[in-house]
Each structure stands twice: as structure tokens, then as C-alpha cells.
Image (cartoon, rainbow, N blue to C red):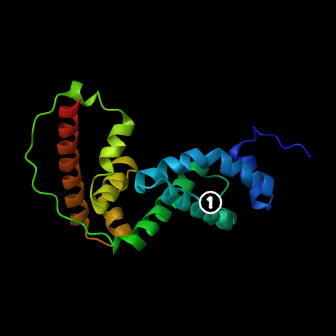
Amino acid sequence: MLIEHNASDAELIRECKKGNLKYQEMLYKRFYAYAMGIGMRYLINKDDALVVVNDAFIKVFNSLHNFKDDLEFRPWFRKILVNTALDSKRKNLKYVYDSEIPEVHQQTMYPSAIEKLSAADILNLMKQLPETHHIVFNLYEIDGYSHKEIGQMLSIPESSSRTYLTRAKQALQKLIQSDLIKI
């Protein structure tokens, strides 16, 4: 049996719902890079990100029967990925010492200097943030969750989410400035 590699997402999902392992493999391959991109934003270590990605795919395949065909797959999958990453972080958060970032004074930055940083540079700088700051920054600035939603997801007050975001931005600004000095 020849499987068409350019099958649409809807076709892949329809066949995956039937338990077709070849189509599950195709779905995994199609969304692996996307999933790893999200996983690497939440987890510093590539191996940890891979564990989260694989766990998310297992959740997808186990709950695909609940997926409504009229929805887009990618946003549904992203939500599963983010929640799986947060679950992983939450398990390990009790072992992480979340040091406070000292107050950072607002400093002027030249836009042309920021342009020298690549996306990889910025992601590496983000990894230097304390865990909670990193997670809140990702959830709010990149994934678009509200502070209320973040508070519910992380079991923290909405005001704490705002504080963590502000401190993350201040710390990133300081890290970017110190990184630019090295350039």
C-alpha cells in the first residue's frame, strides 16, 4: 500500500483516528520540528524537550478521538505541548531555587544594537532567566496567554504573573546590554 506523503492534516488526522500507525508516524514527522521549537523554549535541555515532545504526541494520539474535525490541528497541538511542558516544569520547579533578580534601572538601548542579536542569541539569553520568569515570559509574550490564564496554569496570583514578566523583561534587557558590550 502506497501512502501519500503530501496528505493534508485533515487526512492524516482522519487516518490516525482509525489507528493507522503509518499515518501516526507521518503526523509525528510533520509536526516534530514545530513541537521541538516549542519544547526548546520551555526547557533548557534538548533531551528534556524531546521527552516533553514525545509525551505530548502520546497525549495527542490518545485523545485524538476528542479532536473536532472543524478545528485547526496546530493550535490544538500547541496547547497540548505547552501544557505538557508546564507539567514537566511544575514537577521539577520544587527543586529549583528561584533567586530574585536585583532591581534593574531603565537604560536606553539603541535599536540597531538589538538587530545584531539573532533569534538564537535571544533564546540563549532567555535561558539565563530564573525558571518562573522564563516560563511567564514565554507564555505571555510568545504564546499569547493572558496574566489571568498564566496565573491559573501556574497556580500563582495574576499580579505575580505581571511581576515575573516585568522582572523577566528587565533582566533580558540587562543581559542583552551586557551581551552587546561583548560584541
Residue 94 in view of the camera = yes
> Which quadrant of the figure contains the C terminus?
top left
Along the line of sight, the residue nearer the viewer: 77 or 47: 47
Residue at 92%, 46% (x, y): give it: 1
Along the line of sight, the residue nearer the viewer: 176 or 83: 176
Residue at 31%, 61% (x, y): give it: 131
Q: Position of residue 29 (x, y in %)?
A: 67, 47
Along the line of sight, the residue nearer the viewer: 147 or 179: 179
From the image, tell me which residue sits under label 1.
Answer: 57
Q: Position of residue 14 (x, y in %)?
A: 76, 54
Q: Position of residue 177 (x, y in %)?
A: 18, 37
Residue at 28%, 71% (x, y): give it: 156
Task: Give left or right: position of 33 versus 6.
Answer: left
User: Badge 1: few (under 14), some or many (20 or more) residues near its Cα, within 10 Å?
Assistant: many
| Disc 1, SS | helix
Residue 72 in view of the camera = no
The vertical placement of 158 against 76, above or below, is below
Residue at 40%, 55% (x, y): give it: 44
Quarter location, residue 175? top left
Task: Give left or right: position of 147 versus 17.
Answer: left
**Amino acid at pointer 1:** Phe
Q: Which residue appears farthest toward the right when viewing the image?
A: 1
